[in-house]
Amino acid sequence: MAKKIKWWNRNKNYIIFAKSFSRTTNEFKGKIVYCLDLKDIGKLLSKNSITAKTINHSP
């Protein structure tokens, strides 16, 4: 039997995606925030060798 989860007591993190940012923050109202722009996403994709062809591949 599964245990009950205390939803009111969990940590929340947020990710904000945008074309670009003039400034970013790591925290908002005490919550962790990750700000990713197109350059960041491009770096992550190339770092992990994921291409648009791989993402759009349909079986």
Image: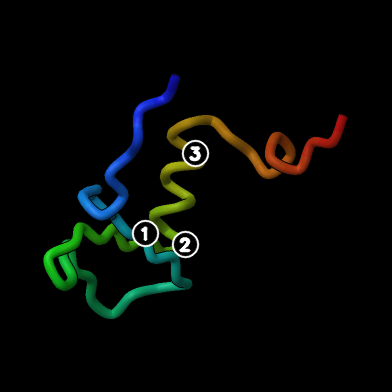
Q: CA distance from mark 1 to mark 3?
A: 20 Å
Is 14 situated left or right of 39 in this image?
left
Q: Residue 29, percent across and down? A: 15, 72
Number of numbered markers: 3
User: Residue 46: x and y, percent?
Assistant: 49, 38
Mark 1 vs 2: CB contact within 8 A:
no
46 sits to left or right of 25: right
Q: Amino acid at mark 1?
A: Ile
The answer to the question of whether label 1 and label 3 lie on touching residues, with beta carbons closer than 8 A, is no
The residue lying furthest to the right in this view is: 59
User: Regarding mark 2 in the picture, which secondary structure is present there?
Assistant: helix
The vertical placement of 6 against 48, above or below, is: below
Q: Which residue is found at the position 36% from the left and 59% from the top? A: 15
Residue at the spot x=43%, y=34% of the render?
47
Q: Is residue 40 above or below residue 17?
A: above
Q: Which residue is mark 3?
A: 46
Q: Which mark is residue 15?
A: 1
* Residue at which label 2 appears: 38
Callout 2 crowding tier (Cα within 10 Å): few <14, some 14–19, many ≥20: few
In the rendered structure, the answer to whether residue 56 lies left or right of residue 27 reads right
Q: Nearer the viewer, residue 8 or 31?
A: 8
Q: What amino acid is labelled 3 in the image?
A: Ser
How far apart, in angstroms, are the residues tagged by discs 1 and 2?
13 Å
Q: Nearer the viewer, residue 9 or 43?
A: 9
For label 3, the crowd category at 10 Å Cα-Cα, with few meaning under 14, some 14 to 19 and many 20 or more, is few
- Distance, label 3 to label 2, CA atoms, is 12 Å
Mark seen at residue 44: none
Drawn side of residue 36 relative to residue 33, left or right: right
N-terminal of the pair, mark 1 or mark 2, is 1
Could you tell me which secondary element the residue under label 1 belongs to? Answer: strand
**Quarter residue 25 falls in:** bottom left
